Amino acid sequence: MVATGDGGGKANVWNAATGAIIQTVTGQDGYLSSLAFTAGGAQLLTAGASNAAKLWDASTGELLTTYRGHSWFVASVGFSPDGSKVLTGGYDGMALIWYAGSPDWWLAFQMGRNWQETGYSGPCNLNGNGQVDDGDLQRMHQFWRR
């Protein structure tokens, strides 16, 4: 599967082999800045100008969870390798980690006061060691150990 987003808050999920649209999700206000699938492709995470990220069922288009915690655009989203955690990185200089399916953030890290200071524009990823790679900053931030 492949996902694409547009300037109007709509994401299309495509069958990569046939080019057919499998599902369309709408409800993200403004443009979409980042999209991510869980490892198995069952869920899709979207983010953008609404200062929130949203978790969707990729096959039905059902909205599962809305993640609100950023004071400015959410620039990048990602999942932990096992899909149990969600990472959002925003132009407000914050990286937030959430339990997938929970609307309350679990852990926060201030990367800077805003995107101009940090140079942050994504992508950001969670690795299996509990570290966040914030892309543009070219360094790893330790959040937790298992």
Image (tube, rainbow, N blue to C red):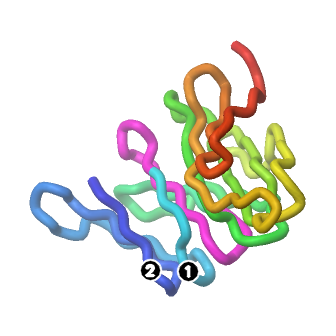
Q: Would you place residue 66 above or below residue 9 in this image?
A: above
Q: At 20% from the left edge and 59% from the top edge, which residue is drawn? A: 15
The local secondary structure at tag 1 comes to: loop
Residue that carries the numbered disc 1 in the rendered image: 31
Asked whether 46 falls inside the magenta stretch, the response is yes
Question: Which mark identifies residue 6?
Answer: 2
10 Å crowding of disc 1: few (<14), some (14-19), many (20+): some
Q: Quick check: 25 above or below 16?
A: below
Q: Which residues are magenta?
A: 37-53
Q: Quadrant of residue 14?
A: bottom left
The span from disc 2 to disc 1 (Cα, nearest Å) is 6 Å
Residue 50 located left or right of residue 31: right
Q: Is residue 39 left or right of residue 120?
A: left
- The tag on residue 23 is none
Evaluate if marks 2 and 1 touch, with contact meaning CB atoms under 8 Å apart. Answer: yes
Rendering coords of residue 115 (x, y %): 76, 65
- Three-letter amino acid code at the position of disc 2: Asp
